Image (cartoon, helix red, strand yellow):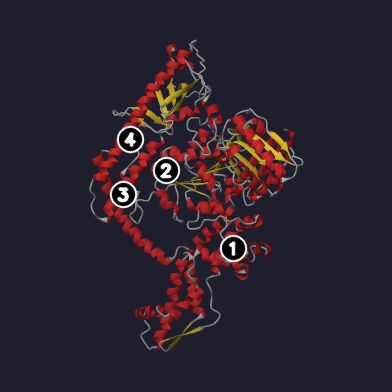
Amino acid sequence: MGGDGVGDAAGGTQSATEREVSLEQSYVDVLYGRLDDIRARAEKTLDDLRRSSSSNTPAGRAEKDAFDALHTERLAQLGAVEDRLVFGRLDMTGGERRYVGRIGMSDEGQQQMLVDWRAPAAAAFYQATAASPGGVARRRHLATRGRTVTGIDDELLDASGLDAADLTTVTGDGALMTALTEHRTGKMRDIVATLQSEQDEIVRAPLTGVLVVQGGPGTGKTAVALHRAAYLLYTHRERIAKSGVLVVGPSPVFLRYIERVLPSLGETGVVLSTPGQIFPSVEATATDRPETAVLKGDLRMARVIRDAVRQRQLLLPKPVPITLDGDQIALRPAAVAEARSRARQTGRPHNEARTTFVKHLLDDLAGQLARSRRLENDPETRLDLAVELRDSVDVRREINLRWMPLSAEGFLDKLFSDAKRLRAATEGKLSKVESRLLLRESGSPWTQADVPLLDEVAELIGPDVTATATAARERARAAAERAEAVRYAQGVLQMSGEASAMMTADMLADRFDSSGSSLTVAERARDDRTWTYGHIVVDEAQEVSPMMWRTLARRVPSRSMTVVGDLAQTSSAAGADTWAGALDSIAKDRWRMAELTVNYRTPAKIMGPAAAMLVATGISVRLPESAREGDWDPVLLRTADEPGAVVEAVLSAVRADDEALGGGQFAVILAREEVTGEVSERVRKSLLAPEYASLAERVSVLSVDDVKGLEYDAVTVVDPAGIIAASARGASDLYVALTRPTQRLTVVHHGDLPEGLGQV
Ligand SMILES: Nc1ncnc2c1ncn2[C@@H]1O[C@H](COP(=O)(O)OP(=O)(O)OP(=O)(O)O)[C@@H](O)[C@H]1O
């Protein structure tokens, strides 16, 4: 907000702005002074803690560590709110004045100095309009750099609520427009100062159920979803902080792009994951052919896997003789059948139900042994003999062969690399052609589409039983330690007088994991497949397959989800065409939809042709209106169909962008296969030449997949017709690419342009 124009209802002069800025500066100084005090106190508490002696038991040390970690985290939170601590002021018609900022702060006398943007008292900052002022006379945006007020921008919503002497309004460049035209930095920033009312409504929507946010490119879906996560953590801390929030985004690059937003909003306890990382211990980076990915995402796979697991619970065609210390006994087909049916009746996962299976067979064998040894055939004798039988390698092998303990990875690898097994499991569910699509070599790397299948398997087979028993003991120990930890934490909190809203004894105790270390909720959740979150945000949700929805739903039994996406941008063959198709199987009648309608990223001059191209391919969606007209028309560069010419055109586009914008972040976007091709390689290499100076660091050469969810000041799209032709959803891929720039677009092409795009 660099502008200093004065729209002064009272006919004021330049000095009115200066006077207002100086008044605001005084208050901003007071707020930062208070922040410094709070920080100093937190530092001192941490210091005292580090110097204090703890009881010299492992639990005592772990408690101290946990408290240390919590205070360190709190200090980090207080550090993260330094930038733009305060950004707004509301003058209410009754004369009350509220400053709105990143966190709430009160003075020593408990008088509110700054209202947290998420508090109900701040809602009017986002929702009030001239038509419906809701008690707000004036809304003021404050721009700051460091701790200095650099600008003010006022909106008078209800002049009747102000004294005549107080009617001065200051008009700056407009906080929103300033934010939208700033150079991009490669990292997403929070939009807490300029959230628009349709966005704010979504941020503050109730916690329960699945909220789908559909919106075109640049409508702020990602930004809104992250602000909503921060809002929910603030408003429902008791309910969701302990279980945490999971944010699922399309790629590691995307997660790095958004990683700073939540910390800047004071929230660190959130797990970020791609769909490929959601199964702990597996990082799926490979991709399947589209038709295989579609099949693996199909809900029929749930039945295939269920049957494949059951087919690992075998019957016995004929008796198997076993000799034990000279005694002849046999594993009997009828006993195996009975054991299997009893085990299945337990309804427990394969590895757990196996205990029932084994017990029944050991009992049957023990009965035979008792008879052979002419012992009393009573339960106690059989129990003794069962112990002996369990130690026999032969017995263990024969029982195992019928009902093996399984691991998810081993099971799926075997299923997909064994044509016979696969046919047996898919029969009646998949065609032969489909079944063959799943076949691959044993030991092949996991693909993203395998992840929900691994999760499905893990759900059906359960954890390793021996691990479960150990875990149960661990849990009991942790529960006892936790009770002690809460008592300890209460003591420390009382001693330090630190009863702030940001910390409770329970939260402090929550720092413990079952091993007594000071892992955070997020760290514990990430490593535990069976962890259930308090809320899940799914970004670029149009790409999620039906099987992946099942996996995500497992992570949030309450179905409290925020699902954001754009059906016009679906590029995965296994992705969604409708939201009902995506969500009915996991949350029928429990999802509702909200829409975002304004594109804050892409200027109208670029959005127009991008939308025309999409419409020409027959995809019909509601297209968002651009918030800005933009300063530059798209540039169309026609070249010869020859790498040297294409590279030259790309480089000249990048040079022109840099000159026009005087810096910024740029992307060159190519079709999926081309990103490792000759043009990409040569562009990357050329940018290293001295004449391009710092450009090499600011230009990313990426495929249409990589840029999902990202944005740049200027974008060069190479070979649009090639992008369309490269996949069944090529038009959506091109639409994504064309809508990434905030300022400038160049299209490098040979041959005709796709319909719509050529009408520029
Ligand atoms: N209210 C706002 N104030 C300032 N900037 C905003 C606002 N809303 C959105 N933006 C900006 O617009 C850009 C696009 O936002 P975002 O990436 O969240 O959109 P999206 O809907 O997820 O886009 P896409 O579907 O193309 O990935 C970002 O730079 C974001 O900061």
The residue that label 2 is drawn on is: 268
Mark 1 is on which residue type? Val
Mark 4 is on which residue type? Arg
The residue that label 1 is drawn on is: 304
The residues tagged by marks 1 and 2 sit, at their Cα atoms, a distance apart of 39 Å
Q: Nearer the viewer, mark 2 or mark 3?
A: 3
Ligand 1 is found in the corner quadrant, namely: top right
Label 4 secondary element: helix
Query: Which one is earlier in the sequence, the residue at label 4 or at label 1?
Result: 4
Mark 2 is on which residue type? Thr
> What label does residue 39 carry, if any?
4
Q: Nearer the viewer, residue 377 or 410?
A: 410
Q: Nearer the viewer, mark 3 or mark 1?
A: 3
Label 2 secondary element: loop
Looking at the rendering, in which quadrant would you find the C terminus? top right
Q: Is residue 590 visible?
A: no
Q: Position of residue 355 (x, y in %)?
A: 43, 70
The residue that label 3 is drawn on is: 65
394 up-or-down from 256: above or below: below
Q: Does the residue at mark 3 contact the one at mark 4 (Cβ under 8 Å)?
A: no
Q: Quadrant of residue 445?
A: bottom right
